[in-house]
Image (tube, rainbow, N blue to C red):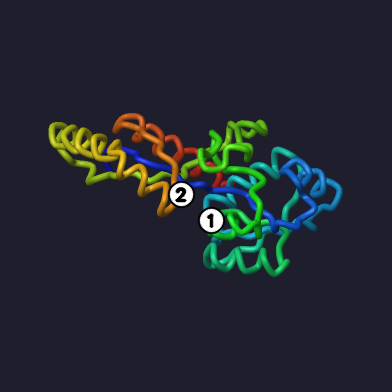
Amino acid sequence: FRQIVQYSAYNMSVMVKADSPFKNFKELIAYARQNPKKVTYGSSAHGIQFFVLEQIAKKEQIQFTYIPFKGTPEVETALMGGHILFGAGDFNYSLVEARQIRYLLMLGKERSEEFPDVPSLKDLGYDDLPDPWYHGICGPKGIPDGIAKKLEEAFTKAMREPHFIEELKKLVRYHIVYRNSKDLGDYVANNYEAFGKLVKE
C-alpha cells in the first residue's frame, strides 16, 4: 500500500471495573509480581493489545494469564462480570461515563485528549513499545506521485475542517493525530517490522 494521510487514533487502553482495588497500573504490576499468573486479562483474540501487554510483562518480569475473546463486547461482559481482572481494548465510552469501568493506562505514546489524567506508555517508561492504533487513508502501492500528492493535500484539508473534528470526537471519541504521507509510511513500516519480531518471539 501507499500511505496517504493519518487523521486520528484510537483510545486503546487497559481498564478495570470501577470498584477494582487497583487505583493505578503500577499497583496492578505490583500485585502480579506477588501473585504469579493470578492476574487475568482479556482482549480481542491475540490482537495488538496482547503483544503490547506481553512485552510489558516481559519487561516487568511478571506473568499475566491471557484469555482471548472474539471481540471487545465480550471482554467488557467478562470484565463487568468479574471473570477477568482487567481488559485491554477500545471500550464503550458509556461505561466510562457511567463510572462502571476505569482506565489505568492508555496504550499509546502520548496521553489522550479525552482522558488526560490517564498515563501513557511513555509516562510509565514503556516508550520503546510499538503503538499502532491509527486511522489512516491509503491506496495501492503504484499510485503515481502526482496523484498521491493531490490526495494527500485534499485529505489533509478535509481532516482539518472544524465540523469533521467535532463529529469525530463526538461520535467515536477518537483524537486527532496527523501524519503526512511520508511520516505515516515510516510509522507503518516501523510498526510492521517491530510486530514481525514480536510474532516470531
Placement of 36 over or under 72, stated as above or below: above
- Residue 137, quarter of the rendered image: top left
Q: Secondary structure at mark 1?
A: helix
Apparent side of residue 168 relative to residue 153 in the rendered image (left or right):
right
Q: CA distance from mark 2 to mark 1?
A: 8 Å
Left or right of 1 on screen, residue 92: right
* Lateral position of residue 1 relative to residue 22, left or right: left
Task: Name the residue carrying label 2.
Answer: 173
- For label 2, the SS is loop
Q: Nearer the viewer, residue 145 or 116?
A: 116
Q: Earlier in the sequence, mark 2 or mark 1?
A: 1
Rendered image quadrant of residue 29: top right
Up/down of 113 relative to 183, above or below: below
Relative to 181, say whether 25 is above or below: below
Amino acid at circle 1: Tyr
The disc labelled 2 sits on which kind of residue? Arg
Q: Is residue 67 visible?
A: yes
Residue farthest to the right, as pictured: 34
At horizontal 54% and vertical 60% (from top left) the residue drawn is 44
Kindly indicate whether the residue at mark 1 contacts the one at mark 2 (C-beta within 8 angstroms). yes
User: What is the total number of numbered labels drawn onto the structure image?
Assistant: 2
Q: Could you tell me which residue is drawn at 63 percent across and 50 percent down?
A: 14
